Amino acid sequence: MLRALLSRLPRLHPRHFHLSKTHLSTTSHLPFLRNVGIFAHVDAGKTTLTENFLDVSDVVSNPGMVDSGTTVTDFLPAERERGITIQSACISFGWGDTKINLIDTPGHVDFSVEISRSVAVLDGAVLVVDGVEGVQAQTETVWNAMQRMGVAGNLREEVDAPLNPIPCVGCVNKLDRVGSNFYSAVSTLNKKLKRQNTTAANAIPIQMPLIKCELTNEVVAGYPEPVEGEFVGVVDLVSDPMRMIVWEDQGKGKRPGLKVGEVEGFIGERAEEARMEMIEMLAEVDEEIEEHYLEETVPPQSTIIKSLRNSTINNKAMPVVAAAALKRKGIEPILDSICSFLPSPLDVQSPSVHSSSPETSSKRVKKKKSSKKSKKESDYPLGHPLNSSLLALAFKVVHVKGRGGGDGRVVFARVFSGELESRTTLKAINAEGSDDKVERPSALLELKGGKMTMLEDGVARCGEVCAIVGLKKVETGDTLVLSGDPATRGVRLNGVSAPKPVLTVKLEARGSEDEKKLEDALRILCVEDPSLKVETGDAADESGMGGGSGILLSGLGELHVEVVCDRLIREFNCDVKVGEPAVALKEALTVGTVLGGEELINFEREIAGNRIQAAVNLRLELISADSDSDNMEGQTILADNSIVLTDEAKSWLQLDFDSEIIDEGDEEEDEHNAVENKCATALISGIKGALQRGPKGNELTNVRCTVLEVSTENGYGDDQAGAIRAAANFAIQKLLKNSSSSDAVVLEPQMTLTVNVHNDYIGNVLSDFTTRGGVISEVYSVNDSEKQVMVGKVPLKSILGYSTKLRSLTAGSGVFAAEYCAHSEHRNV
Ligand SMILES: Nc1nc2c(ncn2[C@@H]2O[C@H](COP(=O)(O)OP(=O)(O)OP(=O)(O)O)[C@@H](O)[C@H]2O)c(=O)[nH]1
Ligand SMILES: [Mg+2]
């Protein structure tokens, strides 16, 4: 019956593309492929929806439940016990004629690297909001990540380049909850989520909810006013004539029956109004619909569908549907919307490709266009699915027992162009452009219904997401190309940016035999999660975090670190003592401090009988003490360190590019040119290394390092690179050592804390927050409910252990989200 319904649902026929004969066999799947992520605030129901997608598409026979720890995608014990998603899971299934590769992401900000890596490989998204709460703190964070305006977590990239947002369909979930209100939730999408160049997200309801009235037991329209009762179905406003879709309870544990009928009577009248509203909203972003609207004619169904699809793909609108995933209602139309409105790999911009090779220079890669009508494969930019050269991004590494031998390393990759085959030789290029990893995959897999299965023909085609076994060295963020392919020589994709850790604990193995086990386990966990940091040796000994030796483990928050420790103990059987958490301090030079810049600092050593010598003159100062109005006080970190070369320094190093700044995120192309020059690379690495430790012992940040002069007695050949690295490192260390204590200030992480609590407890929360040194920025009520939200800034140090405290302050009812916002000057609270 479901299949019959699907054939009648308004499904758009995918666009037809001109495909060359050679590509027809390998690219004909593209219009029928969707790479989609599911994003939301914590607990909005992403995993429950995912589970129900698998159920209605017959991948599993019954949806698993987050609450009983039986879901396919939340499979780690730490996930199942806590009922939260920790790792993004990628799963493939079919819906009608379309294959969907779906990534279920975590909502908790401590796992935001999972958002970054998903954003790097997706073409479309489903944004879920809770029907009672509407847009919440983390909804905004993931939305910003989807706009590719800097990723979730503590990365605050300044992006001047045009953004390339991920098109998205909205879903208001949990409409079975008391107090839920579809239209209020939609209005929060429009009020709180902004797009570049427009004032709102343009969330457009394409359904009208149907409610079984509590008093009369009658099914009525939940529009325009909310109605008390049970969410039972929707009117599909897009189909013509409009259809009622109702999910009828079939008893406990059974999938509700799907009933499709005509819209009539009072519901019909309301649906007409809701439809006109949809058309009016669409008219604002689509000229063809606007014409109909102005002429007061009703656009045909095909025009509405085309308009919704184009507006979604071009990021002008977000069609919104209604659901109650836990009750298994509203699931099928979401899948239809994914197929109908979200882009295939052919509909999206190709990924940015950076190149250090003249033949594949990024300008040519991005801009090359053919004037001929029929394009050849080579006319499409690298990374476009119709270009035949392999270009893939390794976005995730996991370790699965029994897979691929050794430690069971499995690499997930998105193939942007070309074909990835097992047993071909791949070259992996890391974020720094280093390309010395050459490996052969032994097999290619996909995750279906909780099981990894071999890809039928052992080939992952362009546009696909696959899992690769047999790669021992490939890491998250590496670009994969075919070894020896001249078309991809020197190229690299943007990779995956990992937020920097803000919280540290000291780990001590209880027995000497556990030490090795602990190190091995941490190595595996760090490979899986690039937002973790592990330090051993001197750093751990001098940390002041408890006496004796140990390992410092740093992560994005208490939950992050707690989950890693839990995995160490339970999955890796490490007997480990976990110390008290401490926040990751940084330091910055004070305003007006300028160190160095006056003379060459000479470095000379005799190493293994060879004399190495180089001298540098460099200047250190604060980039800016820009006072961001969002921040409480003191210095705020708005950018990472930057390294600037003066013209003189460039000519000494024989660099021939124009830009001054070679180490800021938006100057990657020049940085890449610099990477080609071994002396410049060594210089950057020497500087970066020395900035890891400021005068007060913490990582220095927000420093501008201007290199004024570089001098070596033996010229500037590649063999001088080591000397230049050592000289740069030595010079900075010397300048910092000779600085005075007033030249630098310690900075500590500040968090944006959002607390959602019942009216009765808001007073307790506010007064407690102030005693923690928090500064309240706003307090508002949630959609006319009895709940209030407080948002404010507070030092991370002051909210360690806050979850326990909040429970006691609110009789267990309060929830909070803490997200890193900046490092600011340390104050005593
Ligand atoms: N009432 C109601 N509860 C729901 C619905 N969908 C999910 N839930 C419940 O909400 C809680 C969170 O659901 P999840 O599916 O784990 O949410 P999530 O968005 O994946 O959460 P994270 O991955 O931790 O961010 C669970 O207790 C679910 O049973 C719904 O439609 N109605
Ligand atoms: Mg989840």
Image (cartoon, rainbow, N blue to C red):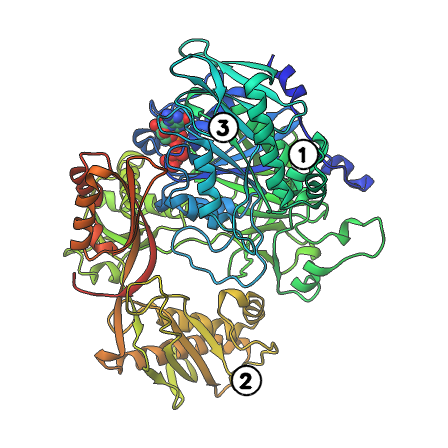
Q: Is residue 96 left or right of residue 600?
A: right
Q: Nearer the viewer, residue 470 or 740?
A: 740
* Position of the C terminus by quadrant: bottom left
The local crowd at label 3, few if under 14, some if 14 to 19, many if 20 or more residues have their Cα within 10 Å, is some
**Which residue does the numbered mark 3 point to in the structure image?**
223
Disc 3 to disc 1, how far (Cα)? Answer: 22 Å
* Rendering quarter of residue 746: bottom left
**Which residue does the numbered mark 1 point to in the structure image?**
305
Q: Amino acid at mark 2?
A: Asp
- Residue 100 placed where, x, y %? 59, 32
Q: Is residue 509 left or right of residue 40?
A: left
Mark 1 and mark 3 in contact (Cβ < 8 Å)? no
Q: Which mark is residue 647?
A: 2
Q: Amino acid at mark 3?
A: Tyr
Q: Nearer the N terminus, badge 3 or badge 1?
A: 3
Q: Give the mark toward the camera: 3 or 2.
A: 3
The local crowd at label 1, few if under 14, some if 14 to 19, many if 20 or more residues have their Cα within 10 Å, is some
Establish if 678 lies above or below 522: below
Q: Nearer the N terminus, badge 3 or badge 2?
A: 3
Q: Nearer the viewer, residue 279 or 399?
A: 279
Q: Is residue 749 left or right of residue 771?
A: right
Residue at x 54% of width, y 84% of height: 647
Residue at x 38% of width, y 84% of height: 604
Q: Nearer the viewer, residue 810 or 493?
A: 810
- Residue 361 placed where, x, y %? 67, 64
- Residue 789 placed where, x, y %? 30, 44
